[in-house]
Image: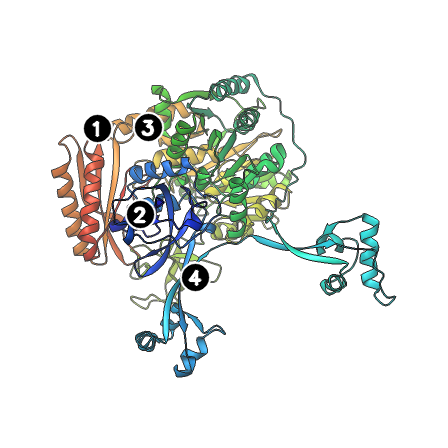
Amino acid sequence: MALVIAQVIVDVSTAAIDRPFDYHVPAQLESFIHPGIRVHIPFGPRKVQGFVISTSDETELDEKKLKPIESVVDIEPVLTAEMLELGKWLKDDTLCFYNDALQVMIPAALRANYTKLVKVENASVLSEPFQNLLSKDLEVDFASLEKQHLIQELKVHLDTGNATIETRIRQKAKPKLQTVYHVIDASIELSGQAKKQQQVVDWILETNSKSFTIVDIQKHVQVTTPVLDALVEKKILKKSKQEVYREIELLADTSIDKVVTLTEAQKEVLETINRAQQNQKSETFLLHGITGSGKTEIYLHAIEEALALGKEAIMLVPEIALTPQMVTRFKMRFGNQVAVMHSGLSVGEKYDEWRKIHRREVRVVVGARSAIFAPFENVGLLILDEEHESSYKQEDSPRYHAREVAKWRAQFTNCPVILGSATPSIESYARAKKGVYTLLELPSRANAKALPPVDLIDMREQLKGGNRSMFSMELIDAIRDRLAKKEQIVLFLNKRGFSSFVLCRDCGTTVQCPNCDISLTYHRMGEALRCHYCGYEELVPTQCPHCESEHIRFFGTGTQKVEEEITKLFPEARTLRMDVDTTRTKGAHERILHHFGQRQADILLGTQMIAKGLDFPEVTLVGVLNADTSLHLADFRAAEKTFQLITQVSGRAGRHEKKGHVIVQTYDPEHYALVNAQTHDYLGFYTQEMQMRKAYQYPPFYYLTHIQISHPDVLTTADYAGKTAEWLRENLSQSTAVIGPTASAISRIQERYRYQCMIKYKREPNLTTALHQLLKLSRTQWEKQGVRISIDLHPSTIV
């Protein structure tokens, strides 16, 4: 009888083992082993997880030397055939390890936790500190022994055989179980003293219940678990554990769906999309619709068509802040057919939502970037709302862009992709103009309301007039006016924290992070200075650490400082602040937006998470406190990002019956990004920005690849960065420019110095081959010296 051989990708991300390994499938596991299933396998001296990617009856190795698969993790494959193919593409497209490409497709809740466990035979010969750490089963976590400096003692017991080490693999989440009581015989008589038990039996007879939970019965009878357990002993009830899903709490009512009549422009756009769905055509649509033009309603109608055709749909939104409002609309339309996937959920909730999709219990997924990997097998429509958003790009390996993954899945399943935005990325709009994408336009708001007027306030003039506040006189007057009218206000600041940095006014020292070359940010809560790159934190100093002067002050403007200023200027105003600090807790996004939507606050102050997609009828004033924050960054996309942010945040005003007004404060009111944002002129901005991109040879006219080299020693980093640039120039064609090496904008993060090179090219046939060779060189030789290299083929930012 022929052996069954499984090809397994091992859950270890290193260059030496970035390939399939052959394992023998024991006879008792043959019916379980299919491509896409996870297994426990011996690998060297330890036990790890792996993904089965294929099976066969042949191997190039000696069959007798093949190790057997020990057990299966899943009953059914967690990865579909499409996902396994997608993993191969992702590995090549992002130059990552195959294991990383497969791991990114399953939720963190399903990923393995590896624990080294020490088992002891005879505890009496151990030292007292060692004995104190042991469990009843004579086991202890290896990490606990490390903390207590007991590794030397452990080694002695390992040598004598009194101790052994084994690897335990656990999943991060488990199914949620609840106790269910089943009625066996409610006719059994009870004694007169068992009054509570009799109340339960009476309720059972009255409602004719066959099974119930304690929560069900407590709505009618005040009863405790011991009472029910007594009925179990008397054979009136029996109890069992049943799996239930964790329910995601939505604060808004999802039972009522507003029926919306589409405009003629919306109908035309929808017909074009639906034709592609009906013809099973892989086509990418760029839906360019101004803010308030009704793009979401088109998404909903297009998904209805996908479901009518027996297909499934994936809808991506860029911010967690947008998810509650979007999920509410989708639940209103599609009910329990909707699963939600984003980072604001608990591990258990993510696990349950993923299993709903995997078990085909839902047909629509709404979520952030990772939802693009939803394990549907019959996708009929993929949508990226706010397609221009940089949050669709993963900055860690694998460095994928959700848009490119969506296009790959659309080609694989022959279905359309909708990329929607009021301010499409320059690259996407250029592709639409060239005919690579199909351009669909919605040039006016769905309710025929005009876009709000935008005033650019020159803050230089405010300073000359003696106003040193962060609020211009025009914005102060407009806020007072709206507060008097009981209307709502959105204030936007593209920052978080109380102040940008802490500076000594005597010697000019700024308080720096000890691990990164960047100043620490002051956070009022906890009076702390924090690094937003490595998480380092320290208390605010009372004197300068360099010259010991007491003249140490906060500089810059953060959301906490603005909130304090609002309280001084408008003491009667109720303010909600929405930034990374106020939304750390679970469900915080939704609570803040719900309170604002219920008119429990007059002003919503926030960072970019409030800039787009939010829809509140009473918001009539939007204030942008400093439009220049993102305008002068060392990034060729700085003007584009600023235009997009100002246009998007402007679209939050006057979306319903009341007229809106937008005030943008700036020190550079003549900049073309702001001038075009003022007139809501995307085409005008696109034309000017394309001229700039062409002149400076940036995308979409040229492609960029970003290479970063890091090491704890600055000279070593510079040396290997020079070797990298030299190697690239030798192995790429002369028409390709290798720029650098130069120190990165933030030259040190987490105690590692960073240098970078940039490859700029129009066509480079050798690029993929050369980069694979460079990675091989780095992984086989340079990593031994502590040098790390990372390659981003399609960088969204360069820092």
Tell me the distance, in whole angstroms, between the alpha carbons under discs 3 and 1.
22 Å
Identify the disc placed on residue 298: none
Earlier sequence position, callout 1 versus callout 2? 2
Q: Which residue is drawn at 85% across and 61% down?
A: 189
Identify the disc placed on residue 763: 1
Identify whether 301 is placed above or below 668: above
Earlier sequence position, callout 3 versus callout 4? 4
Earlier sequence position, callout 3 versus callout 1? 3
Quadrant where the N terminus is found in the figure: top left
**Of the residues shown, which amino acid type is indicated by label 3?**
Glu
Classify mark 2: residues with Cα within 10 Å, few (<14), some (14-19) or many (20+). many
Identify whether 283 is placed above or below 481: above
In this rendering, which labeled residue sits more in front, label 1 or label 2?
Answer: 2
Q: Residue at x 62, y 36 (%)?
A: 335
Identify the disc placed on residue 22: 2
- Quarter assignment of residue 798: top left
Determine which residue is flagged by label 3.
Answer: 689
Tell me the distance, in whole angstroms, between the alpha carbons under discs 1 and 2.
39 Å
**Is there CB contact under 8 Å for labels 1 and 2?**
no
Earlier sequence position, callout 4 versus callout 2? 2
**Is there CB contact under 8 Å for labels 2 and 3?**
no
Classify mark 3: residues with Cα within 10 Å, few (<14), some (14-19) or many (20+). some
Q: What element carries label 3?
A: helix
In this view of the protein, can residue 321 be seen by the observer? no
Determine which residue is flagged by label 4.
Answer: 528
**Of the residues shown, which amino acid type is indicated by label 4?**
Ala
